[in-house]
Image (spheres, helix red, strand yellow):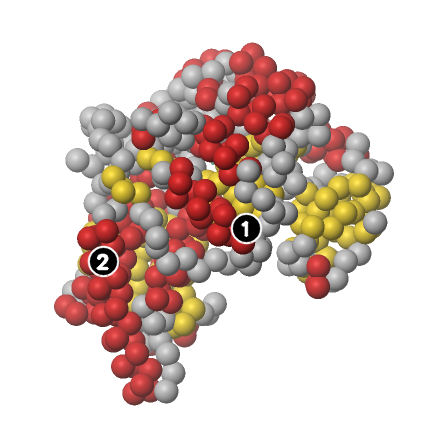
Amino acid sequence: MRNNTYNRKVDMSTKTVEISLLEKEEQNGYMAAVRAHNDAFAERNGFRRTAFVLTLGCQQNESDSEKISGMAQAMGYDLTDTPDDAYLIVVNTCAIREHAEKRALSLVGQYKHVKAKRPETIIAVCGCMTAQEHRVKQLKNSYPYVDILFGTSQLHRFPEFLAEKIAKGKRVLRSDEPENTVPEDMPVRRESNYRAWVSAMYGCNNFCSYCIVPYVRGRERSRRKEQIVKEVRELVAQGYNDITLLGQNVNSYGKDLGADYDFADLLAEIDKIEGDYLLHFMTSHPKDATHKLIDVMAQGTHIAHHFHLPMQSGSDAVLKAMNRRYDFARYVSIVDYIREKMPDATITSDIIVGFPGETEEDFEATLTALGRARFDMVYSFIYSPRKGTPAAEMEQVPDEIKSARFERLLDRQNEISLENNKKLEGQTLRVLCDGKSKNKSEAINGRTDGGRIVFFNGDESMTGKFINVKITRSETFALYGEII
Ligand code: 5AD
Ligand code: SF4
């Protein structure tokens, strides 16, 4: 059953299935076969085939791409940053908004010339966009140079698809509906040697009416607690000091397992691991954000005092139409509780403007809500209709109105972010150093526990280390300071 049309029945009953040992061994066999093929090439030519992995979208995709890169390396590819030289190109796509899909399609289009130059280059497209029937058709028909297509829950079968393409030469289009699988023990090639993603769970059951995620990522399924704790313990032992637990809705963690523990228990358990590290998690759904979770954070040793709590709108009518299952009063009571228990907490949020039916009054309620919640940072989005979701069928707000509201939202939030940042002047904050900044080439930058960017007078040898920085100046999107 393909789940990406809203009116079709969505199966919520299936149980989480961990990939079996047998299946893992099967994939290991495919990996060995591709590796032999690539080793023979290297032997003949004196250099190794290269792979280029491009990631669009969220942290979950970044995490998936680290697994794709890990598998590619295990299959004998050297990783490259230049698609023009690559013998294997993987585009890990996003479908959250139209812009993301357009970007993915345009990038895939650009790789046509690589294939024209070197026909043996294999192009694979995966991720959220390829879990939709209409996009699969489009890629199949209009992008004939795409060799492999697979969906989000078939990541662990990438070696099989690649081996099949190499052995038979035919296209491998295997973008089936999301399955209830949980892969374990896959090779991972982490981008950083101090920041790491750890999946706590996959999928989402919430069906917010604007969101494509439940259709392309499937039902909620949790990893076993022991597996997660083991992974974090190993990362801390390897020197990782900034670990983020991922899940579309981490507060639902454990429900599908029928476990007697929840996400707060998982956090508390991980927090017991000794070491100098910081633990983050994202994303939380306000309907499930419990006092227990906030208490665990407040009492924890390693848990960042950072809560990313998407509000989406400050209007109760819009929240209802969004199927968010909370109202603003409930939302703000959580914010108040976080501030009561952790006065130093950074609270960030997501807001959508121009949701179908949003009136001027609704929008003003969101502006008022910003003033009440006083977020430190907001990720704001113009509503983008997603095919197959209920909101796409509702009466749309005209584009000019959406854009004008978006600008007003940014202006209001920027004032608040600046006011909040000003309060940090004179304070000493712990900053995890990220080395030289990409934008300001000379400056050294890092992030506070809550994710604020800080520029300071450090040097590159501090990269990956916690540094205490006294904040001397603040702007809307950045702080400036000096090492204590
Ligand atoms: N249009 C605009 N923004 C969206 N988001 C999710 N779906 C859409 C959409 N169709 C936003 C939500 C979510 C964030 C990850 O992306 O705010 O929290
Ligand atoms: Fe999308 Fe809502 Fe699930 Fe978040 S909780 S992934 S917004 S459906």
Q: Label 1's element?
A: helix
Q: Label 2's element?
A: helix
Q: Is mark 1 within 8 Å of ligand 1?
A: no
Residue depicted at 53% across the width and 57% down the height = 238
Nearer the observer, 163 or 354: 163
Question: Residue 148 location in percent, x, y?
Answer: 25, 59
What amino acid type should be assigned to the residue bearing mark 1? Val
Question: Residue 408 location in percent, x, y?
Answer: 63, 29
The label number, if any, that marks residue 236 in the structure image: 1
Nearer the observer, 469 or 292: 292
Question: Spatial distance from mark 2 to mark 1, Cα to Cα?
Answer: 28 Å
Question: Residue 84 location in percent, x, y?
Answer: 41, 72
Q: Return the residue at label 2.
A: 25
Vertical comparison of 116 with 441: above or below: below
Nearer the observer, 474 or 45: 45
Number of marks in picture = 2
Residue 260 visible in the picture? yes
Q: Is residue 335 left or right of residue 109?
A: right
